[in-house]
Image (cartoon, rainbow, N blue to C red):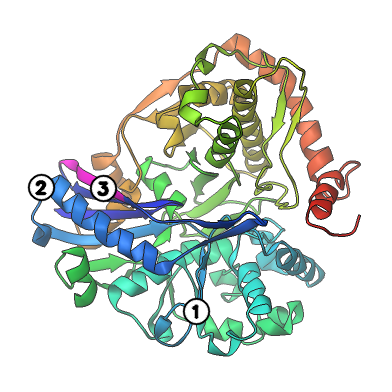
Amino acid sequence: MIAAGIDFGTLSVRVSIFDSKQGRLGSATADYPLFRRNSDPDHATQSHRDHMDALARAMRKAIETSEVDAADIAAIALDTTGSSVIPVGEGLVPLDDYYLWCDHRARREAAEITEAGRAADLEALAWCGGVYSSEWGFSKLLHWLRHNPEKRASLVTALEHCDMAVATLCGIHDPRELPRSICAMGHKWMWNRDLGGLPSEEFLAKVDPLLAGTRAKLGGRYATSATLAGHLCAEWAAKLGLRAGIPIPVGAIDAHWDALGAGVREGDVVNVVGTSTCIMAIARKVDLIPGVCGVVQGSIHPDYYGIEAGLSATGDLFDAIARRAGTHVAMLSRGLERYRAGQTGLLRLAWDNGDRTVLVNPELGGVTLGWNLAHIPQDELFAAIEGTAFHTRIILERMAEHGVAIHRIINAGGIPRKNETLNRVYANVLNKPVLVPEGDVTSLGSAIMALMAAGAFKTIEDAQQALCPPYRTIAPDPQEAAVYATLYPVFQKLYFALGQPGADLGDVLPALRQVAQGGPT
């Protein structure tokens, strides 16, 4: 049986055609623009039309590359970045562009939601780590409502990218029929089945009267990806070159399905390392984990709790270092394989896009300690790789402290496949073997869910067994690991002293940001 897996990333969409027995037959990508503003580093938006036009191009190219008859494609499934939020009006027509996941303009709104949630002892806030993020849905929606008064009356609802894309492909225009991904709504909007769904109308209105009534507007069919969202409508079947009527399951966030494609099992942690890092795990039972982005039943695998944490910038950070040096990461990385643990004398806190976990603090900025006059940009790049590994260790220790079993560490995403230095450093910093899939797993998770929707496999585990690539193992070097064991407590001390509000130095980086933005000193 043949199906198509669709993965919307930050800058492009990938479509992969998979056969349930032969594996990947072909794939293709198409780019779309990301709109940023030099005057506002927190601004990051994208167009729904750009996304869907790119999907049509990539689908047709993937079909051509795979040399299959498009009529044989039995199902499609898609994942997207999250929380990427779009406000829509009648007929689910966009009122604005997406607030992309990396848009942090809603820092103030997130802080207000956190403050109100703590004052109300909101249990839903505890399930998403105890701090609400500027990356997430309600903060972005409130920011949009505050800054678009002329459009408020037209707002029918707001959608996550995965739900908007699926609704478009299914030809759904009625908000009551909307598929709502438990993956996206649970991790980014505080939806919790056991707590009655979304936070109460009373709570939202207390945060800001502009949120009054939004709970009712966020209706629809909340479900895991084991549920069908609908079937491909004739309009989009023609645009994609596919057969109308094929099934489409409820969508999900890209990193969550990347974990499926990487072969995640209970006891695994999957580091999906790309523009940012998402750290994913599944468990039958789990406690609340302070500072971790979310614990949501059915979000990654429909039968398990999904646990999400991560770093707000990884590949983006490496790109920024290379850009400032007038080159690109591949060029700057040449020779890094000769660098040894701690040799640069630099210690890098990778907060250039804020802290996603465990501090959940967007007010931070990147810090590099230990500079001397002989340092070069390549030294900073290596220190940044070390810094992201140290930060990952902070997160894994927090998860383990709260009952998450960690037996295997899998480095997935695009960067580990092409950056062996990163894998080596992670193995040494974590002092554990790191597994790297030998094949590309991007869009494999969405292909697995498409094949499940088509009935090709009885269980996700059966699909993983048939389709997931084997791993190669990077073992830690005892001498390197010993150096990092010495450096880690220093990093840990700085991480909490500089990054945690109320700590001795916790006001330094937010003050720098405020002054740079023209605020009061």
Name the one closer to the observer, 77 or 432: 77
**Residue 339 in the image: above or below residue 87:** above
Question: Is residue 331 visible to the viewer in this orientation of the structure?
Answer: yes
Queried whether the magenta region covers residue 101, the answer comes back as no
Name the one closer to the observer, 390 or 369: 369
Q: Which residue is mark 3?
A: 28
Secondary structure category for the residue under label 3: strand
What residue type is disc 3 on? Ala
The residue that appears at 33% across and 29% down in the rendered structure is 438
Q: Which callout, 3 or 1, points at the residue further toward the start of the chain?
A: 3
Neighbour tally class for label 3: few under 14, some 14-19, many 20 plus, Cα within 10 Å: many
Q: Residue furthest bottom?
A: 153
Secondary structure category for the residue under label 2: loop
**Range shown magenta:** 22-29
Q: Which callout, 1 or 2, points at the residue further toward the start of the chain?
A: 2
Neighbour tally class for label 1: few under 14, some 14-19, many 20 plus, Cα within 10 Å: some
Instruction: Report which quarter residue 102 is drawn in.
Output: bottom right
Q: Which residue is mark 1?
A: 95
Is residue 343 left or right of 21 when viewed as pictured? right
Secondary structure category for the residue under label 1: loop
The residue that appears at 68% across and 16% down in the rendered structure is 344
What residue type is disc 1 on? Leu
Image location of residue 134, percent across then percent down: 66, 60
Image location of residue 403, percent across then percent down: 62, 44
Q: Which residue is mark 2?
A: 67
